[in-house]
């Protein structure tokens, strides 16, 4: 049974081709938002390159190599060390450069996996360049990042670049049935509608959707009081929450704000009698502003910048 990987057909075809031909994809960069499947793609690629199965089954998901990679304990899939500041420094790269020429312990090749390539500082990236240009024949590099902009152009030029693809509704439903079989049909449908094709976000919504929804509702109620300081203070509290999925929060905020807009337009709504009223003109102005704000996480803005900017934007609209 092959390893399941939804969407990303071009990536899967390239991974299998590289595995079968024994060339290509020596250096691979996978970019995408948190929860979009970068880690699963990396495991798929590592398994394809090192899989012990027959060609038509690569990556099989069943051989010893595939199982060890899935469990995160294969000795030839190596994560570079970080220093105390959680940075992959020049010293760590120099150590890697010494190790990279040592033959694999168990598999037919070695994979160096940078799970957060943003942690490579500029000096570390420059120190890595020579290896990326001419890696040993049995060595592969996989770098994961939220955005390619965090990497030097010289690093990008030495790699094959892929961007994670969103899952369609059918694939998302299949994924959620497998990973969260206890979830109700209504909960799955709600998660799919809010996740924007992001599988990790959908899972988070299934487990924490009610909590996130309450936070979004509190944000709107705070905005409705026309108290700019309180809105800024609550936004600062949310931005300090390292576990908060800002994109998911914005999706839910939009859903709730849309309910308010429907009510203001006389269309009515059901199920959320606590959504504050902003009036038709301001509700639509807030929605228009929010549509632009929802692009900010993909532009790699920090949570602090997003909530500060959103608070200022909402306050300007509501206090006219």
Image (cartoon, rainbow, N blue to C red):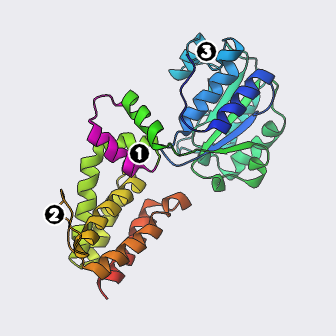
Residue under label 3: 65
Residue located 26% across and 75% down the image? 265
The image quadrant that residue 60 belongs to is: top right
The single residue placed furthest to the right in the displayed view is 134
Residue 243 position (above or below residue 43): below
Q: CA distance from mark 1 to mark 3?
A: 29 Å
Measured as percent of width and height from the top left, residue 305 is found at: 45, 67
Q: Which residue is mark 2?
A: 274
Magenta segment, which residues?
A: 180-196
Vertical position of residue 58 compared to residue 204: above or below:
above
In the foreground, 15 or 226: 15
Q: Return the residue found at the far bottom.
A: 320
Q: Main secondary structure of the magenta part?
A: helix
Figure check: 215 above or below 286: above
What residue does disc 1 label? 201
Mark earlier in primary sequence (3, 2): 3
Q: Nearer the viewer, residue 197 or 158?
A: 197
Q: Which mark is residue 108?
A: none
Horizontal and vertical percent position of residue 155: 75, 47
């Amino acid at each position: 049974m092959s390893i399941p990987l939804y969407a990303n057909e071009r990536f899967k075809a390239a991974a299998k081709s590289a595995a079968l031909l024994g060339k290509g994809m020596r250096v691979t960069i996978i970019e995408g938002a948190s929860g979009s499947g970068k880690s699963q793609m990396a495991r798929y690629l590592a398994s394809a390159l090192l899989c012990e199965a027959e060609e038509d089954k690569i990556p099989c998901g069943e051989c010893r190599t595939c199982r060890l990679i899935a469990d995160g304990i294969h000795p030839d899939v190596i994560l570079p060390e970080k220093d105390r500041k959680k940075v992959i420094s020049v010293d760590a790269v120099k150590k890697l450069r010494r190790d990279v020429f040592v033959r694999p312990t168990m598999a037919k090749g070695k994979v160096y996996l940078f799970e957060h390539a943003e942690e490579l500082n500029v000096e570390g990236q420059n120190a890595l360049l020579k290896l990326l240009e001419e890696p040993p024949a049995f060595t592969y590099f996989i770098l994961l990042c939220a955005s390619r902009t965090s990497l030097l152009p010289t690093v990008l030029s030495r790699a094959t670049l892929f961007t994670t693809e969103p899952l369609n509704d059918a694939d998302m439903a299949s994924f959620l049935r497998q990973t969260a079989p206890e979830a109700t049909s209504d909960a799955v449908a709600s998660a799919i509608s809010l996740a924007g094709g992001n599988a990790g976000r959908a899972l988070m919504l299934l487990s924490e959707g009610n909590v996130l929804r309450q936070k979004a509702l509190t944000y709107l109620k705070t905005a409705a009081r026309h108290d700019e300081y309180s809105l800024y203070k609550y936004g600062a509290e949310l931005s300090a929450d390292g576990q908060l999925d800002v994109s998911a929060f914005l999706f839910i905020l939009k859903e709730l704000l849309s309910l308010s807009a429907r009510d203001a337009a006389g269309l009515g709504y059901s199920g959320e009698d606590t959504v504050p009223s902003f009036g038709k003109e301001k509700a639509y102005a807030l929605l228009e502003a929010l549509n632009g704000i929802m692009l900010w996480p993909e532009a790699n803005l920090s949570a602090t910048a997003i909530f500060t900017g959103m608070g200022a934007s909402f306050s300007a609209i509501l206090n006219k």
